[in-house]
Image: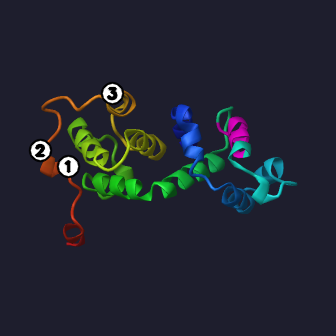
Amino acid sequence: MPIKALRSVADHFDEILRYSNPKRLVNETFKADKPFYFKHFKGYRPEKIGRGFIKKVAQREIFADPGHELFANLLIIHWNEGHLKLYEEMVTHVRTIDEDVEAIERIEPAKAHAIIDDLAKRHELVDILLCVRLNGVRFDEELIVSRLEKGEPAPAGDAPAQADAEPPSEAAAAE
């Protein structure tokens, strides 16, 4: 899944890398997958490894088959941490549909448009696109392309009333 997610936003990979911390990434691969670490990072000082080097590793380990799931997942985690507010808001929205977000198979277009409209007030569309793709948010593919890739507005009558688009308040969530 992480490899497929990163491949789906390959045109934005430099933006994703901007939020990676190469030194931390090397340390995490050392702890989680020593053969991968030795293959790519042994002999380099972690403080000398930059995003360009990480990009070269990604070209071999994410964008070429079969791909390295752990490395892809670490890059996604770094991006999510760099966009924590957006990530948390997305989770809040999706949990209003079903508390068990993994159980959601599809988010209805009307709800998806409302989520996008709300998030677009505070975040760039490209960041929302990356959040949706990298985290497997279950929007319809056509909706993702039209709203987030092409930047088209929601079709008239497809988005619910604005009150439905707001995430629940902290007080309501605590009840």
Q: Is residue 136 left or right of residue 96?
A: right
- What whole-number distance in Å separates the C-alpha atoms at marks 1 and 2? 7 Å
- Is the residue 94 above or below the residue 61 in the image? below
For mark 2, what is the residue? Answer: 161
Res 82 label = none
* Mark toward the start of the polypeptide (3 vs 2): 3
- What whole-number distance in Å separates the C-alpha atoms at marks 3 and 2? 21 Å
Dot 1: within a 10 Å radius of its alpha carbon, few (fewer than 14), some, or many (20 or more) residues? many
- What whole-number distance in Å separates the C-alpha atoms at marks 3 and 1? 19 Å
Label 3: which secondary element: helix
Q: Is residue 161 left or right of residue 72?
A: left
The amino acid at mark 2 is: Ala
Label 2: which secondary element: loop
The amino acid at mark 3 is: Ser
Which quadrant of the rendered structure holds the C terminus?
bottom left
Residue 152 in the image: state x and y as whole percent: 29, 28
For mark 3, what is the residue? Answer: 146
- Is the residue 173 above or below the residue 152 in the image? below
> Which quadrant of the view contains residue 83?
bottom left
Residue 40 in the image: state x and y as whole percent: 80, 47
* Mark toward the start of the polypeptide (3 vs 1): 3
Residue 35 in the image: state x and y as whole percent: 80, 52
Dots 1, 2 in contact, CB < 8 A: yes
Residue 112 in the image: state x and y as whole percent: 27, 41
- Is the residue 48 above or below the residue 1 in the image? below
Label 1: which secondary element: helix
Q: Outermost residue, right direction? A: 43
The one nearer the camera, 43 or 30, is 43
For mark 1, what is the residue? Answer: 165
* Segment tinted magenta in the rendering: 54-62
Q: Residue at x 20, y 38 (%)?
A: 110
